[in-house]
Image (cartoon, rainbow, N blue to C red):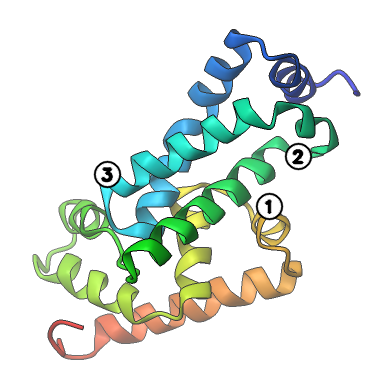
């Protein structure tokens, strides 16, 4: 390994050191949770997905030797955990908490949070996922591309198209629930 803090963290995870798992959780847990909320629409499901990721780290720690980018690996893991959970419940919703946060965040229109939530629900899943990884997870487009196994331009385009659709949806009169 090259000696960066991420390399040391990965070495600790592979070795099974408890403090390495705690450090990984401290560094990434919140953003993984936020991304999972954005993908699943449920705080409880998101908490379970994050737990799935960290249990998976413990169980498969030897395979971490092959990981080059821990952040991308963790966000790919949360994506797979979210997909598994969404398939189990046969629906994909976006989190109402995000819409509430955005509405409280200062728009003059108190209805903008609800309208945004409905607009997010209308996005294709790959665009919704990219938005969650970028906004909630704080991933760069390069990291999103690595996480999703797509090209950098594809990741950036999905985000751009999603933002265009959201802007348009917020300009239009409200069409009610999806």
Using the image, tell me which numbered label, if any, was put on residue 143: 1
Asked if residue 22 lies left or right of residue 2, the reply is left
Q: Is mark 2 on a helix, strand or loop?
A: loop
Rendered location of residue 151, percent (x, y)? 76, 69
- Look at 79% across and 38% down and name the residue there: 67
The quarter of the displayed image where residue 170 is located:
bottom left
- Look at 53% across and 16% down and name the residue there: 22
**Mark 3 → mark 1, Cα distance in angstroms:** 26 Å
Residue of label 3: 44
Q: Residue furthest right?
A: 2
The quarter of the displayed image where residue 150 is located:
bottom right
- Look at 18% across and 59% down and name the residue there: 103
Using the image, tell me which numbered label, if any, was put on residue 69: 2
Eye-nearest disc, 3 or 2: 3
Q: What is the crowding at mark 2: few (fewer than 14 residues within 10 Å), some, or many (at least 20)?
A: some
Asked if residue 101 lies left or right of residue 19, the reply is left
Q: What element carries label 3?
A: helix
């Amino acid at each position: 390994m090259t000696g960066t803090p991420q390399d040391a963290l990965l070495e600790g995870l592979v070795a099974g050191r408890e403090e390495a798992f705690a450090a990984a959780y401290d560094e990434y847990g919140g953003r993984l949770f936020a991304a999972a909320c954005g993908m699943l629409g449920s705080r409880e499901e998101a908490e379970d997905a994050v737990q799935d990721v960290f249990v998976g780290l413990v169980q498969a720690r030897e395979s971490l030797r092959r990981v080059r980018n821990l952040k991308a690996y963790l966000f790919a893991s949360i994506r797979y955990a979210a997909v598994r959970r969404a398939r189990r419940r046969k629906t994909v919703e976006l989190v109402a908490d995000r819409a509430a946060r955005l509405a409280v965040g200062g728009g003059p229109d108190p209805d903008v949070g609800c309208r945004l939530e409905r607009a997010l629900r209308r996005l294709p899943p790959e665009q919704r996922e990219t938005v969650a990884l970028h906004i909630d997870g704080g991933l760069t487009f390069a990291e999103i591309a690595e996480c999703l196994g797509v090209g950098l331009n594809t990741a950036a385009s999905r985000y751009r198209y999603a933002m265009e659709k959201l802007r348009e949806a917020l300009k239009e009169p409200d069409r009610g629930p999806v």
